[in-house]
Structures are given as structure tokens and as C-alpha cells.
Amino acid sequence: MDGRPYFITVDEARAICQQTPPPLRTEHRPIEMCTGRVLAEDLKSMVNDPPFDNSAMDGFACRFDEAASYPCTLTVVGLQAASGDNELVEVGPGEAVRIMTGAPMPPGADAILPIERCDVGDGTVVLLEPPKPHFVRKLGENLKQGTIALTKGQRLTPARIGLCATMGYASVPVFQRLNIAIVSTGDELKSPGEALAHGEIYESNSYGLAGLVEWAGHTPVRFPSVADTMDALRDALNEATKTCDLILTSGGVSMGEFDYVRRIMEEEGDVHFWRMKIRPGSPPLFGVWNGTPLFGLPGNPVSSHVVFRMLVAPYLRHALGTDGPKEWTVRARLCDPVKSTNDCMTLRRVTLTSTEEGMMAHQPRHQGSGNLESLASASGLTLLQPGQSGEVGAWIDVLVL
Ligand code: AMP
Ligand code: MG
């Protein structure tokens, strides 16, 4: 390893990866095509929200100090719809205007009484109680023009997309999705749909990793799986650098005779670290192949998934300076024992149940890192720190899957 970092903590590994970010590009896109994208600039509101004083209720607009006692009868002098028609009727003493939710307040009126609290007559209305000033939504009360309401790095959720529109933006600057190559390695791998010979298995990591790349907000580019030879691997990695910003490989990074990803990265690429203190998933490496950052993920299907969540997802969030997709951790009480170690973080699959005593974490029986079913049926990963007890009853942090 030439003195390069070896068998380091998760935090150390994250810090090393972050020093070699992927290239970022910005584009302007119509907001209806931006759900899940990450804002590339702060956004100032182009308007006041609301842009004018308006009614929060269907009812009657009138003067707050209209009468000393109620019920009180007023003359209806007009009707105000939420229509953008600005011929507003003035409301004088003893007068009211029938008004709809969202319609501009007529001049002279400063309070609203909802229709349910009124007796409507012919040309008159009886207010059964005093009108309410708080049913008037005031100009700019949600957002003043020029205020920054969304900031660079925020992931555009449906609510945030709506807010872009409220602020007057038809299109917004967002980061382009990264093209992320996924290269599975292994002589034993066959694609699902093909017949299996003895000794072969179905290749699953590229599909799971592609799903994770999409979940993280980027574009997966799956390559055909590669045989365990230096030449095949070199060709595949070179091909991936032509179109992709980042490469994820799976398999070939541990101590096996045919673990060529590690070997080719050591001999012809640039390894920034190898192996991390995490179980499962200890053999990952990070480095650069021909100018393109590369994560060498473990071949065991659970391990490759866990390492993506612990290493690749934080790397991508950090590169874009983004808050999404949000990682949730919850405190949960262990209902089954989890074997922890003194030097590694332990990430076991658990199912979470919400109870009156808090969140409970159960561990499925079979936890092999090749057992993808145990991940598919899990709802969380234990975040047991090195040396932390995993005995029954311990309250621990769990990463929600
Ligand atoms: P490796 O790290 O290449 O030694 O692989 C470790 C284990 O994961 C072996 O049992 C492989 O057969 C299995 N494995 C490697 N790559 C994949 C893949 N893409 N899909 C499913 N299993 C895999
Ligand atoms: Mg292999």
C-alpha cells in the first residue's frame, strides 16, 4: 500500500474521498422537471407573497369597529372574487362586500366574517359576531420580495418546487445529475434471465447499486459485468471514464487471488485508501482511474449496499453541498443481541417497530453479507460504534433504510 491509508475509520475514509470530488455542472430547467434536483444558486423571491392583502375565508369584508354590539346589519355593496379584476368596491361605514377566499381586500375593509357566521338577506347581511382581522392575509406576510427563501444545495422536494413557482420562477438553476458508472466484476456472474451453470450466480449488485444511484439523485450507467482479468477490467474502466463522472465497481477488492480491482488500481491507478473499519463491508477502496474518482465496493451484495450508504451517499451529498436525500437515524432499543467489535462499526440489518416505549429493533436470524433477503426485509442498519455494547435492551442509533 506504499504508506497509503489502510483500514481506517468511516470518518477518516469520508474525509479522504471528499478531497477528490466529481465534476459539477449547472443547468437551467423548467421547475416541473426539477423534483429531486439540487439547487445550484440561492433563490430570491421575485414578488411579495401574498402580493396583495386578501381574504383567507369565503365571507364578508367589512370594518372591524363596525358596531358596538352584535348581531349587526350591513348593506352589501359589491362582490369581490379572486379573479385578478381590480375594480375594487370601497367599503364605507354600515357596508360590507361579499368576498371569496384569495380575493383582494376592498379599500376601507380591514376584517372578514366567514359566511357561516352571517345571515344573508336581500341586499343586506347580518353579522352574528364581530368580524376577524386575522382572516386578512397581509401583503408579504409569508415572504417579502427579495428575500432568499431557498438556498443553494437544497434538494427540490414537491413543496420546494411549489415555492419556486410562488416566488415567480418558471425555471431554476440546478446541478446536472452525475453519470455514475457501475461495473460489476467476477467470472461467476451471469445476468438474470440467462441459464446458470454450476458455480455461477446471478449478478445482482449492479441492479441494487443502480437503484441507490437513482435514490441519491443521479444517473446510473450499468456496464456489462467484467471477467476477472486485468485486460478486461482495464478496458471496462477506460470505457467508463469516457462517459461517466464517477465509477463504482463491485467485487475484486479483498484478499482473493483474483481480486483484480485492487490490483489494477494499485499498479495502474491511484489508491487513496483501502479497507475501512466497518462490518459488513470492510474491503472498499477509493482512488482515481485516469482522472475519474472510483469507489471499489465489495462484492458481497449486502456489503456493497451498506458501503454505498456509509461512503458513497455522503460523498455525493458533500460534493453537491446538499441536504438530500435526507438520512434519518432513530434511537431504538435492541430486542435481539448484536455482536459488536472493538475496532469496527457494526451495521446489522434490523426491522423497526414503533411502540409506546419507543422504537424497537429486531434482528433477523440470518445475517450473512451474501444474504440479500435479510437486507430486503430490513428497515434499518445498526450504527454500533466500535466497542459499543449490542446487548438486548441497549438503546442505539439506527440508520433508517
Ligand atoms: P469478491 O469481492 O469479488 O470476492 O466477491 C465476494 C462475494 O460476492 C462472492 O461470493 C461473489 O460471488 C459475490 N459477488 C460479487 N459480485 C457480485 C455481484 N455483482 N452480484 C452478486 N454477487 C456478487
Ligand atoms: Mg470476485
Image: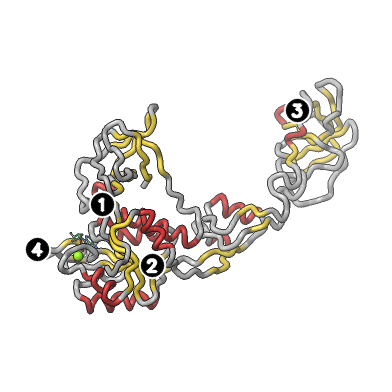
Above or below, 194 against 216 in this view is below
Q: Earlier in the sequence, mark 3 or mark 2?
A: 3
User: Mark 2: few, some, or many residues within 10 Å (few <14, many ≥20)?
Assistant: many
Above or below, 54 against 353 in this view is below
Q: Which residue sits at x=46%, y=65%?
A: 177
Q: Quadrant of the N terminus?
A: bottom left
Q: Callout 1: helix, strand or loop?
A: loop
Nearest to viewer (mark 1 / mark 4): 1
Can you tell which quarter of the image residue 215 is in? bottom left
Q: Earlier in the sequence, mark 3 or mark 1?
A: 3
Can you tell which quarter of the image residue 377 is in? top left
Label ID, residue 180? 2
Nearest to viewer (mark 2 / mark 4): 2
Q: Which residue sits at x=42%, y=67%?
A: 20
- The residue that label 3 is drawn on is 118
* Most foreground residue, 276 or 99: 276
Above or below, 249 against 138 in this view is below
